[in-house]
Image (cartoon, rainbow, N blue to C red):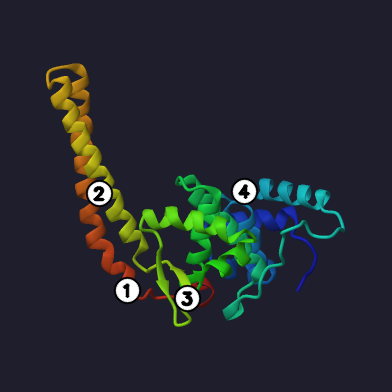
């Protein structure tokens, strides 16, 4: 099996494999490389949908140029050992990518990091000290993020057998999030309709608010209906095969 860094040709082959919908294991076999090598490469460079061979090669060269043999920065930690034979570096790269996606949805960086840390645990729960140690931040920072996530029904608190407070992310977190979004949309519908009465239904501003109310009312109803119909998916065990179906 060849060693050393991936070449630009290797990365072009990875990009072609992703475009063809191949699993990481299949792409890795074509390169005669470990599956973990391909997984890390893709996750560090935009994920399956955003991977570009030329950009990935340039980014790798820049990282290699900046890298110096020195002690790790204060607060930095080596990837923790992973259960089920997972590659620690691949998991960390995926965690960073997932955090970026959550930040684009509106969460702050720390809230996104806490949310992703909980999502990626097999137990679906962590204590404040476990989160603080994993994220290398203070318990107070964790508590502030948890308070917001809890207000959005994204996490909940419970006590374990040792009376420690644990933060839990449930299997139906996305359903609960959709329900909360529906409630927020309904409130916006109500306030828009109040504005119609205040500004007058025959005025341009009143007509605008009425259109807003009608649009959001339709979206809220559709979202609520779709969430209920899709809820059973959360409790259906997926049909999975090793190495992504390869």
Nearer to us of marks 1 and 4 is 1
Task: Report x, y in % for residue 213.
Answer: 20, 34
Q: Is residue 160 left or right of residue 8?
A: left
Q: Which residue is disc 1 drawn over?
A: 236
Q: Which residue is disc 2 drawn over?
A: 183
Q: Is residue 214 left or right of residue 120?
A: left
Residue 238, compared with residue 192, is above or below; it is below
Q: Is residue 155 visible?
A: yes
Instruction: Classify residue 130 by image quadrant.
Output: bottom right
How far is disc 1 from disc 4 in space, using C-alphas?
34 Å
Q: Residue at x 55, y 49 (%)?
A: 109
What SS does tag 3 mark?
loop
Residue 121, compared with residue 191, is above or below; it is below
* Picture mark count: 4
How far is disc 3 from disc 1 in space, using C-alphas?
18 Å
How far is disc 1 from disc 2 in space, using C-alphas?
26 Å
């Amino acid at each position: 099996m060849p060693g050393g860094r991936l070449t630009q040709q290797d990365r072009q082959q990875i990009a072609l494999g992703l475009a063809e919908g191949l699993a990481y294991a299949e792409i890795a076999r074509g390169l005669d490389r470990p599956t973990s090598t391909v997984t890390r490469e893709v996750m560090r460079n935009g994920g399956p949908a955003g991977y570009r061979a030329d950009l990935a090669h340039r980014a790798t060269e820049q990282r290699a140029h900046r890298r110096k043999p020195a002690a790790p920065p204060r607060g930095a930690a080596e990837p923790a050992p992973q259960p089920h034979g997972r590659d620690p570096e691949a998991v960390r790269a995926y965690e960073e990518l997932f955090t970026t996606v959550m930040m684009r949805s509106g969460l702050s960086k720390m809230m996104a990091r806490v949310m992703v840390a909980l999502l990626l645990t097999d137990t679906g729960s962590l204590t404040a000290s476990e989160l603080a140690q994993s994220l290398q931040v203070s318990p107070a920072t964790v508590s502030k993020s948890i308070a917001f996530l809890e207000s959005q029904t994204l996490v909940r608190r419970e006590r374990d057998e040792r009376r420690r407070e644990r933060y839990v992310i449930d299997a139906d977190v996305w359903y609960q999030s959709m329900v909360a979004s529906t409630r927020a949309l309904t409130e916006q519908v109500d306030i828009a309709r109040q504005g119609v009465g205040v500004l007058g239904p025959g005025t341009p501003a009143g007509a605008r608010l009425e259109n807003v109310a009608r649009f959001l009312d339709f979206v809220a109803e559709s979202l609520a209906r779709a969430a209920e119909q899709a809820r059973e998916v959360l409790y259906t065990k997926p049909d999975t095969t090793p190495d992504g179906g390869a």
